[in-house]
Amino acid sequence: MSATKERRPAIDGWFTTADSSTGDGTVRLLGTRCASCGTPYFPRNELACRNPGCTGPKDGSELAEYAFSPRGRVWSYADARYKPPPPYVSPEPFRPYTIAAVELAEERIVVLGQVVPGIGVDDLAVGMAVELTEGVLYEDDEAEYTVWMWRPVSE
């Protein structure tokens, strides 16, 4: 019987995992949000608010940790039929996958990510509702390395 491998985020600090501190099993992207004007940043911005209309301080003190909404709508999508160059790690042999640009429901920013395995471009449509989930990007002898992925949901 084989032991279950540890699951580790492929990129630390960019998203919560299903077993992390959110407590509800919801995967969320992590970033920052300006306390003065509400502008969200993903990935995290730690320097200063870049919104030219913001009247808050521009020293980074205005930025707070922020967990993004887990749902959105497909803005665009495509097949990734080529193997990305290093440092991207992909399984051998390389298997094409689908990517989607998703406009988050609350923040209205567009975030790119892989779509869960088994869902191709023929299964997607612009405007389709999706939510974040955690999926395995690659694995080695020690662990499975996970990233956020989009999966279609019914409304």
Image (cartoon, rainbow, N blue to C red):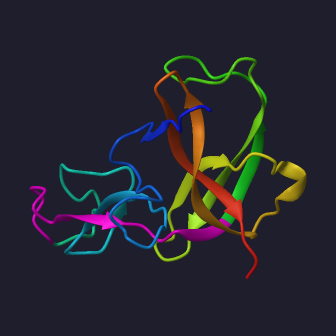
Query: Where 43 sits versus 133, above or below?
Result: above
Query: Where 104 sits versus 4, above or below?
Result: below
Query: Left or right of 80: which side holds 86?
Result: left
Q: Position of residue 63 (x, y in %)?
A: 19, 63
Quadrant (top left/top right/bottom left/bottom right) for the N terminus: top right
Residue at far right of view: 122
> How many numbered dots are placed on residues in this image?
0
Q: Position of residue 94 (x, y in %)?
A: 74, 22
Is residue 75 part of the magenta span, yes or no? no
Query: Left or right of 54: which side holds 2?
Result: right
Is residue 58 part of the magenta span, yes or no? yes
Give the residue drawn at x 78%, y 29%.
Answer: 81
Q: Position of residue 124 (x, y in %)?
A: 82, 59
Span of residues in magenta: 56-73
Query: Left or right of 71: which side holds 24?
Result: left
Residue at far bottom of view: 155
Query: Where 73 sits versus 93, above or below?
Result: below
Q: Which residue is nearer to you in this view: 51 or 63?
A: 63
Quadrant (top left/top right/bottom left/bottom right) for the C terminus: bottom right
> Which of the 4 image quarters holds residue 132?
bottom right
Give the residue drawn at x 58%, y 36%.
Answer: 137
Give the residue drawn at x 59%, y 65%.
Answer: 103
